[in-house]
């Protein structure tokens, strides 16, 4: 397919010194099968309109190289569950390069591509199960308005991959603004390669924040941007009930996008202590710990950058995390409650609602969605009625007509989220070569705020079995 050869990859990362990566091709599957191609995203990336996705498969599978791409695996390090790991890297991933879009440069990265020098004891593969979860979640997050890696294409194979049981292997191409992680800087700092830190900082500034080239103190301004985008991202996670599950510093994008989806989970019943990752025995990455872990990770990044940013400035930036987080949190929660005016007690109103949800085991997403509808039916008990009274009192401060308010609330309180049990059902069918549930779910998640009443059952809180699914790190 000639048009694919003409895709204009820029390979800015591969122009950096070799200390940052290993240039390589990857290991194809014998029998690759197209599972899904995301035409909307392909269009944004400038793929030819008339592309037959089957023609894309050999490129993804590694049988045909893109003419203009310089594929590589990246090296980085990180703090995993708080412990320092001096070397990690793309153990099963390949960065193809960047494509220019109207939103700037976008990385294309293949996950599940086989062994690299950073595979350690792994096989370099990803199983169909985890690839489906990542594929769905990237799109779900993006369409909820949460910065995230996205999903361009997924291919499957009959190649067996050994985890707790034998599973099928799959690969996907994910698209993200960057694959540079906090762990890239930590790797350089803690492995006596700190002379390369300014090179990476300059690279990030030149590509993503060229305006900082004019700044007196570009490195500290960059650090501030990273800290603030992290704080805002995690505020969004909290507002939409998303638990990442593995907030290691190697899974933190320096541009504040959600990525490296593993045992993530959306809240069903509101449970602030929700631990989505079955392997997280101490609850380090529990839902309500995410904001402070985000800050912990920023500290780890600060330590890696300590020779390049003045200490007082670092402290100032770190100290601003909390305010940025709460400002964003309050901003979104106000919208979720349909509040345009600001009142100093608004966050308290949210907190009271959350306590009520927790006490009554209410579904987080559906409760917010219902707020603009069947209020009285929802709050039947004494505490609930009291809260509703306060809310209605607060609504009197609002100038927006109530019909408009309700409409606006439906554009921020989703009806459809990627519930674990829905992903699980889609996976079970896909493992039996039936992709209908997967396709339906993906289409719904691309329009999470639409009513789509024929799919009412996919908006319901999970059945009991669906609340008890255990998702581990194995992927
Ligand atoms: P993750 O928990 O998926 O973010 O992965 C942590 C580290 O382990 C990263 O460096 C991955 O590239 C690596 N890794 C995970 N799974 C595999 C695998 N199956 N083969 C090789 N490396 C892997
Ligand atoms: Mg990772």
Image (tube, grey):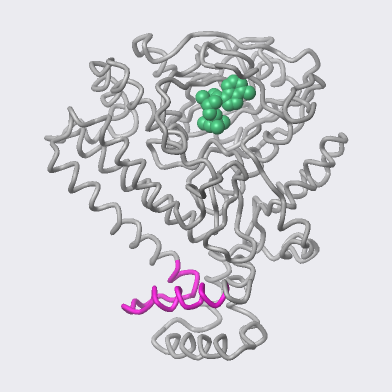
Up the image or down, 168 lies above or below 348; here it is above
The residue lying toward the viewer, choosing from 457 and 191, is: 191
Quarter-of-image position of residue 58 = top right
Q: Quadrant of the C terminus?
A: top right
Up the image or down, 43 lies above or below 240; here it is above
Up the image or down, 233 lies above or below 87; here it is below
Q: Position of residue 427 (x, y in %)?
A: 78, 41
Q: Is residue 454 shown to the viewer in this render?
A: yes
Quadrant for ligand 1 reads top right
Q: Position of residue 139 (x, y in %)?
A: 61, 44
Q: Is residue 108 shown to the viewer in this render?
A: no
Q: Position of residue 233 (x, y in %)?
A: 42, 50
Q: Position of residue 303 (x, y in %)?
A: 26, 33
The residue lying toward the viewer, choosing from 155 and 38, is: 155
| Residue at horizontal 39 percent and vertical 65 percent from the top | 331
State which region is magenta.
333-357
Q: Left or right: where does residue 448 sit relative to residue 460?
A: left
Q: Quadrant of the N terminus?
A: top right
| Residue at horizontal 75 percent and vertical 22 percent from the top | 161
The residue lying toward the viewer, choosing from 335 and 127, is: 127
Count the labels in the image. Answer: 0
| Residue at horizontal 30 percent and vertical 56 percent from the top | 322
């Amino acid at each position: 397919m000639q048009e694919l050869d003409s895709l204009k990859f820029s390979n800015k990362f591969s122009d950096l010194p070799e200390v940052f990566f290993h240039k390589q091709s990857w290991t194809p599957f014998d029998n690759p099968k197209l599972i899904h191609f995301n035409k909307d995203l392909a269009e944004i990336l400038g793929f030819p309109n008339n592309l037959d996705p089957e023609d894309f498969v050999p490129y993804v599978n590694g049988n045909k190289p893109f003419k203009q791409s310089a594929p590589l695996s990246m090296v980085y390090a990180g703090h995993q569950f708080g412990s320092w790991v001096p070397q990690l890297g793309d153990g099963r991933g390949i960065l193809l390069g960047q494509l220019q879009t109207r939103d700037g440069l976008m990385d294309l990265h293949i996950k599940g591509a086989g062994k690299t020098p950073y595979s350690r004891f792994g096989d370099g593969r990803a199983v169909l199960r985890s690839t489906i979860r990542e594929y769905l979640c990237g799109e779900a997050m993006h369409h909820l308005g949460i910065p995230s890696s996205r999903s361009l294409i997924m291919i499957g194979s009959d190649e067996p991959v050994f985890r707790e049981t034998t599973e099928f292997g799959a690969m996907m191409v994910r698209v993200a603004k960057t694959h540079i992680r906090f762990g890239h800087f930590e790797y350089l700092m803690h492995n006596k390669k700190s002379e390369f830190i300014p090179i990476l900082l300059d690279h990030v500034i030149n590509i993503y924040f060229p305006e900082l080239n004019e700044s007196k103190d570009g490195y500290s301004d960059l650090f501030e941007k990273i800290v603030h985008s992290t704080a805002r991202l995690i505020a969004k996670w909290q507002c939409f009930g998303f638990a990442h599950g593995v907030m290691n510093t190697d899974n933190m994008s320096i541009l504040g996008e959600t990525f490296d989806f593993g045992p993530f989970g959306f809240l069903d019943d509101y449970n602030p202590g929700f631990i989505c990752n079955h392997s997280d025995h101490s609850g380090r990455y529990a839902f309500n710990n995410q904001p402070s872990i985000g800050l912990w990770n920023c500290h780890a990044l600060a330590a890696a950058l300590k020779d390049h940013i003045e200490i007082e400035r670092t402290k100032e930036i770190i100290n601003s995390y909390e305010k940025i987080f709460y400002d964003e949190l309050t901003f979104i929660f106000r919208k979720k409650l349909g509040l345009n005016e600001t009142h100093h007690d608004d966050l308290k109103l949210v907190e009271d609602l959350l306590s009520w949800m927790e006490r009554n085991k209410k579904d987080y997403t559906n409760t917010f969605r219902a707020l603009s509808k069947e209020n009285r039916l929802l709050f039947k008990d004494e505490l609930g009625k009291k809260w509703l009274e306060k809310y209605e009192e607060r609504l009197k401060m609002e100038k927006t007509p109530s019909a408009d308010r309700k409409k606006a609330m439906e554009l921020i309180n989703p009806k459809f989220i990627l519930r674990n049990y829905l992903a699980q059902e889609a996976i079970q069918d896909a493992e039996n070569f039936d992709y209908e549930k997967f396709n339906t779910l993906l289409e719904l998640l691309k329009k999470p705020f639409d009513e789509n009443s024929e799919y009412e059952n996919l908006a319901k809180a999970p059945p009991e079995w669906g609340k008890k699914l255990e998702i581990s790190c194995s992927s």
